[in-house]
């Protein structure tokens, strides 16, 4: 018996949660339930996180959280509960299976059966943003080796457990050579540990186009956070409906399961909503807690119900569907099909014994790290890089010299093009003039002298090599 936490959420949440629980309990799920309140009521009571401390305690105690959709009020500084939960509980892996149900649910891709595995905690979703000048804001893209190793290993272990044949990595490392480059590098390293599983890498833009056009080419796709967020919704939609997709958020100790759609308040209380998305999340939960026999029974009954043409309004289609039903009636139909398997759709068979082998991250031996320069980011409202270079050359520090100026990543000095449009945000690179390294004391002197000459330095980035390898980007055009 496993004790889980549930939240019925807002809008259609209570209806689809009741339907989901009715189905899995009828199938023999061995669970005990603690219910908590999250979402709109909690937000409007003055808690901008949408969840009380006591509810956190319940989730952390039980480790398993089944959550219906919630409504986040507009404005007022309310925080996304989904993002908060993923980060606080270390739910690093977002898993979204996307399978077409042709011909019972309309789709252009009748053979589609892919799983999107998305890193869930870092990348641009770290949410670290700053306005630095009148014209420029920045968002920091953070990619860590632990984050890469955990998500890539999860993808291969998932493929191994569920009998998948190929894992594909999507990045943009032809442009972001340090951040996406690390993700790709770690993918290649870990892929070698799974010689029985085919692996490949695609640049995200052409990979996304290929997935949208020919999704049957792919099996499991693993991606950094932003790309995974976008493409998991695209994948769910091209199967036929976002409303049919469930999602798992997996961490080292806790896990959260949910539908990927919203709370649809306009449909609330009308016995119209399709509970399939949350039911798919619950099936993933049952697999996760070792009740794969129950999960298999529920999934096959759900497929049989879809195949029988018993459909809620969102997927009902004349000539294909046989009966339009409400939320409760759909649940009753699934329950009536427990123990049966689909005939046309592919029945599932889950491995009761398979366990994901996910060792905790082990930090590597520290690299030899050498400081070899510094980038000073300057707020200057001029337009000509040559004029800024002249001002910066007045900042005279022994052993250090100005080597490059870029604007929005494009080299504009020396030998820049006068056609290049420049904002008021300039990256000014200082390197050693004698070929040796740079000291932090020299950087402090640079900042002091820049201030004395009226140069507005808004941030600095130290330039390092790790084990002799350059670990910073050049300017485009250099």
Image (tube, rainbow, N blue to C red):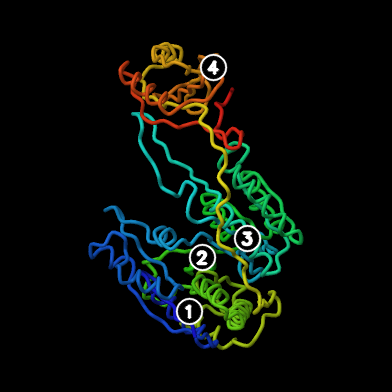
Which-is-in-front pick, marks 4 and 2? 4
Q: What is the CA distance from the residue labelled 4 to the residue labelled 3? A: 47 Å
User: How far apart are labels 1 and 4 at the CA level?
Assistant: 70 Å
For label 2, the residue is 252
Q: Which residue is mark 4?
A: 434
Which of 125 and 312 lies nearest the eye of the viewer?
A: 125
Real-space Cα separation, disc 3 to disc 1, in angstroms: 27 Å
Relative horizontal placement of residue 232, taking residue 450 as reference (left or right) = right
User: Which label's residue is closer to the chain start, 4 or 3?
Assistant: 3
Q: Are marks 3 and 1 in contact (CB under 8 Å)?
A: no
Quarter of the picture holding the C terminus: top right
Instruction: Pinpoint residue 29: horizontal percent, then vertical percent.
Output: 52, 85
Tag 1, which secondary structure?
A: helix
Label 1 sits on residue: 20
Q: Which mark is in front, 3 or 2?
A: 2
- What residue is rendered at 47% in x and 64% in y? 261
Look at the numbered disc 4 and give the secondary structure of its residue.
Answer: loop
Of the two numbered discs 1 and 4 in the rendering, the one whose residue sits closer to the viewer: 4
Label 1–label 4 contact, CB within 8 A: no
Q: Are marks 3 and 2 in contact (CB under 8 Å)?
A: no
Task: Categorize mark 4 by other alpha carbons within 10 Å: few (<14), some (14-19), many (20+).
Answer: few
Verify CB contact (< 8 Å) between mark 2 and mark 1: no
Q: Residue 154's spot in the image, x, y percent?
A: 60, 61
Q: Secondary structure at mark 3?
A: helix
The residue singled out by tag 3 in the image is 155
């Amino acid at each position: 018996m496993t004790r889980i936490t549930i939240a019925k959420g807002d809008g259609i949440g209570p209806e689809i949660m009741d339907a989901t629980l009715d189905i899995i309990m009828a199938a023999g799920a061995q669970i005990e339930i603690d219910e908590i309140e999250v979402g709109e009521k909690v937000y409007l009571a003055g808690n901008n996180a949408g969840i009380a401390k006591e509810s956190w305690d319940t989730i952390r105690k039980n480790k398993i959280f089944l959550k219906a959709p919630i409504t986040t009020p507009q404005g007022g500084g309310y925080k996304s509960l989904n993002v908060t939960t993923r980060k606080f509980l270390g739910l690093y892996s977002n898993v979204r299976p996307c399978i077409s149900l042709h011909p019972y649910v309309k789709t252009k891709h009748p053979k589609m059966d892919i799983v999107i595995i998305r890193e869930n905690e870092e990348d641009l979703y770290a949410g670290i943003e700053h306005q630095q000048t009148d014209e420029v804001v920045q968002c920091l893209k953070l990619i860590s080796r632990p984050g890469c190793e955990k998500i890539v290993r999860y993808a291969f272990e998932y493929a191994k457990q569920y009998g998948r044949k190929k894992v594909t990595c999507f990045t943009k490392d032809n442009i972001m050579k340090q951040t996406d480059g690390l993700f790709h590098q770690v993918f290649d390293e870990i892929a070698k540990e799974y010689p029985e599983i085919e692996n490949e890498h695609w640049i995200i833009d052409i990979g996304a186009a290929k997935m949208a056009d020919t999704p049957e080419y792919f099996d499991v796709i693993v991606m950094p956070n932003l790309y995974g967020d976008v493409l998991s919704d695209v994948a769910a939609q091209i199967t036929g409906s976002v409303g049919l997709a469930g999602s798992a958020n997996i961490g080292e100790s806790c896990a959260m399961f949910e539908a990927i759609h919203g709370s649809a308040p306009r449909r609330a209380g009308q016995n119209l909503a399709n509970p399939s998305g949350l039911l798919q999340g619950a099936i993933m939960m049952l697999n996760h807690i070792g009740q794969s026999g129950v999960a298999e029974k529920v999934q096959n009954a759900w497929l049989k119900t879809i195949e029988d043409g018993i459909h809620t309004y969102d997927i009902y289609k004349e000539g294909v569907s046989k009966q339009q039903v409400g939320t409760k009636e759909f649940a009753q139909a699934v329950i009536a099909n427990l123990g049966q398997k689909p005939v046309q759709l592919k029945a599932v068979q889950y491995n009761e014994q398979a366990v994901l082998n996910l060792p905790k991250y082990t930090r590597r031996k520290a690299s030899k790290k050498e400081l070899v320069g510094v980038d000073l980011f300057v707020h200057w409202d001029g337009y000509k890089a040559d004029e800024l270079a002249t001002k910066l050359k007045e900042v005279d520090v022994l052993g250090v010299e100005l080597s490059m100026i870029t604007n929005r990543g494009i080299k504009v000095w020396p030998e820049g093009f006068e056609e290049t449009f420049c904002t008021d945000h300039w990256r000014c690179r200082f390197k050693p003039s004698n070929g040796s390294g740079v000291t932090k004391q020299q950087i402090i002197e640079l900042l002091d002298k820049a201030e004395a000459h009226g140069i507005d330095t808004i941030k600095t980035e130290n330039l390092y090599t790790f084990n002799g390898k350059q670990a910073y980007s050049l300017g485009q055009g250099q």
